[in-house]
Image (cartoon, grey):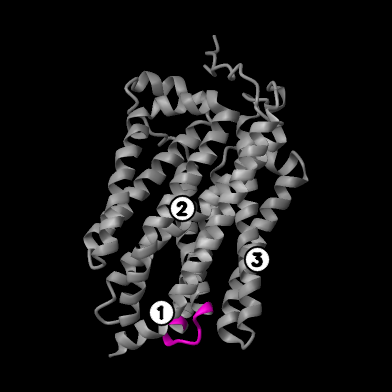
Amino acid sequence: MTELIPVPAADPMPLPGPLWLMLVLLLVTFLLHLIAMNLTVGGILIAVICSLKRKRDGFSGLLVGDLVRILPTTLAFTITLGVAALLFVQVLYGNLLYASSILIGAFWIAVIPTLIVAYYGLYYCKSHARSTGLLWLVLFLLLAIGFVYVNNFTLMMEPSRWLAMYRHSAAGLNLNWSDGSLAPRYLHFMLGAFAIAGFAVFLVGVWQRATEYGQWMQRQGAQWFVVSTVLNYAVGMWFLIALPRSVLVDLFTGGPLAAMLIGLGMLLPLAAVAHVLLSIRTSKILLHARLAVATTFLTLVVMVVLRQVVRGAYLAPFVRLHDLAVSPQWSVIVLFLLLFVAGLATVFVMLRKYWTAQGEQVPTREMSSAD
């Protein structure tokens, strides 16, 4: 007798808005969370690398100081935007996410105290920039949190594994080790974080290219971005091949959208790499830097949308989002959108003022470092 797959019923409460709007908000908030997460995790990794070289390279020491001053802020953005994205996941897939969260419950609950320790560790590093050991600890803690999240969101898509896991441990001590896509998916995210953080260093270097420090950041950030992006190609192919056969068939035969997204996901990073390299080897620095920003941002958008398409292929046998009841609460939605846009505008103005002030301090800091 075939064993039934225990998939909980969907929440009987109707969606508070049209399905397309919930999906758009999920993708937008996740994209913003992803950018902040990449800057945080990748930035900490860069700070660790530079801290090992600062005795023989003064610019590495400067970059460590700059990074540890802003990393607590980027981590705050990561958490806030992650909560928003997680809420929309719960609205659409709450019955699945709660089940997978229970199966890895011990690790899922441990995320909160782990994050608190990492957060305060970054704040300590902000006033003690030479705390390399603490930077290593914070990096390890955030990488561990990312690993738990990848476990949960892969397990959420595979209800066929749930019963065996529950029988193995009803105390929430499971991890999704048997999923062949777990390792490449995790590495794909972490290498991407290093690439985006390196790209951010490159952009700051372009902005401050009139100084030796800015030129150093431009070259070094370009190197980090290019190397990690090229490595991520191999990991991305591993990830694609590791997907279940049924998901792969659905991606390539279910319609043109997935195939188009996969093609763009392969071509856009190459374009970004090309423009980054051209910006440091030609006189048209700003032109190629702007094109690199556009292609890199489009790459992130494509990856976020493709991730949702892959999720849909995984969950096709278990979930029909179009069957969910909808009862729009337009007043709440309009208020949310207004506050959301106002919040983003406020953050943009704050960041612009911050970077303007930082740019004015660079020549003085560079002179003092040279002395």
Q: Is residue 221 visible?
A: no
Q: CA distance from mark 1 to mark 2?
A: 27 Å
| The quarter of the displayed image where residue 348 is located | bottom right
User: Given the image, on which type of amino acid does mark 2 rest?
Assistant: Met
Report how far apart the C-alphas of labels 2 and 3 lie in the structure.
19 Å
Which residue is labeled 2 in the image?
A: 37
Give the magenta part as a residue range: 207-214
Q: Which quadrant: the N terminus?
A: top right
What whole-number distance in Å separates the C-alpha atoms at marks 3 and 1?
A: 28 Å
Give yes or no for residue 209 being in the magenta stretch: yes
Residue 77 position in % (x across, y down): 46, 51
Q: Is residue 235 above or below residue 99?
A: below
Neighbourhood count class around disc 2 (C-alpha, 10 Å): few under 14, some 14–19, many 20 upward: many
Note whether residue 311 is visible.
yes
Find residue 294 and name its label. 3
Q: Amino acid at mark 3?
A: Ala
* Residue 110, above or below 220: above
Q: Which residue is mark 1?
A: 361
Q: Residue at x 43, y 87 (%)?
A: 212
